[in-house]
Amino acid sequence: MAGETSRPAADATTDPELACPISPVVDIVFSRWTSPILWSLHAFGRQRFVELERRIEKITPKVLTQRLRQLERDGLVVRTYHPEVPPRVEYEISELGRTLSPLFAQIAEWAAANLDHVERARRHYDEAGAPRG
Amino acid sequence: MAGETSRPAADATTDPELACPISPVVDIVFSRWTSPILWSLHAFGRQRFVELERRIEKITPKVLTQRLRQLERDGLVVRTYHPEVPPRVEYEISELGRTLSPLFAQIAEWAAANLDHVERARRHYDEAGAPRG
DNA sequence: GTAGTCACTTTCCTCTAGGTACCTACTATA
DNA sequence: TATAGTAGGTACCTAGAGGAAAGTGACTAC
């Protein structure tokens, strides 16, 4: 594990942070692959590694491990290791992670209400809206 | 899958597409550099290209243009070109983009309430919480 | 005549996140 | 004997996002 993970976003968006108080949250909660993971744990409860791996298609075990470690480090996910054979590891949302629920709900609500607006805007732009300048 | 009645959760559990309804929103609103841009326009109103460029430090004009085009295409930002000399272009949040305000507010609120929890969790993890397994 | 402003565009280049593939230890099952 | 299953670790490599720097065109101010 040494030194490959665990320094993902702190520097990458340090400067946007000055202009935008939500950037740190975006780095923590909405960086790549983390939202499906958090949503999966939020929606379906405690799950094992392979369950997550199968549910979130196209994610590789390496990246899933990285993201879970990062989320565990940030205190949003709790990892429980059972030293059995075969080994069993369970992941679940932490109490801190659960405070994200209203956020997720509101985002899902916005999606339901406005995603087709975005889709329509894209079609309109692609048909006629080339920028003049 | 064929002709069974009333399996509400079963589809959501097995279908990876349904695994995370917030991912599309994340792609549109919270992809790299877009949140500072949206926040800047949301917080300081209509702005010219250079104003954004100066406010969002470290962003290059190339990337700023890319992101603004993308946001314009998604209908979240409105671009107004004034054919003067020197040219003047103004960007502002669209009506659709304004529907994101409560979302931004809630994220900022979550940040104020919980960002130090994350920070503490990180310190704790780095000190003692190496994963066992 | 030269420098500066604006809103980009273009070209070139670097960096790294993520993908591929293979590896571990241990047991149950066939 | 061999294979499958679990939870990853590790080494290598690629694609593509993003950074750096220069150019553009039309005009103005010095």
Image (cartoon, coloured by chain):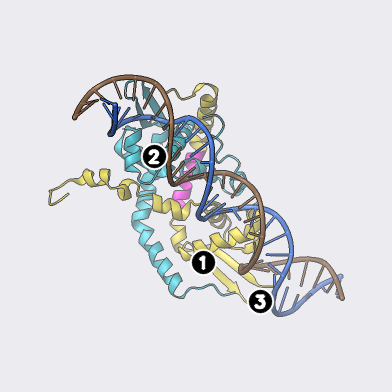
Chain colours: A cyan, B yellow, C brown, D blue
**Residue to which mark 1 is pinned:** B78
Between circles 1 and 2, the one closer to the viewer is: 2
Q: Give the mark, 1 or 3, whose residue is nearer the N terminus.
A: 1
Report whether B78 appears left or right of A119: right
Say what amino acid the circle numbered 1 marks. Answer: Val
The part of the chain drawn in magenta is B101-111
Q: Position of residue A110 (x, y in %)?
A: 38, 53
Label 3 sits on a secondary structure element that is loop
Label 2 sits on a secondary structure element that is helix
Number of labelled discs?
A: 3
| 10 Å crowding of disc 1: few (<14), some (14-19), many (20+) | some
Residue A10 occupies quadrant = top right
**Chain ID at mark 2:** A
The answer to whether the residues at label 1 and label 3 have Cβ atoms under 8 Å apart is: no
- Look at the image and tell me whether residue B98 can be seen: yes
Q: Is residue B27 magenta?
A: no
Quadrant the C terminus of chain B occupies:
top left
Residue at 61%, 61% (x, y): give it.
Answer: B62
Residue A124, relative to residue B13: is it above or below?
A: below
| 10 Å crowding of disc 2: few (<14), some (14-19), many (20+) | many
**Chain ID at mark 1:** B
The answer to whether the residues at label 3 and label 2 have Cβ atoms under 8 Å apart is: no
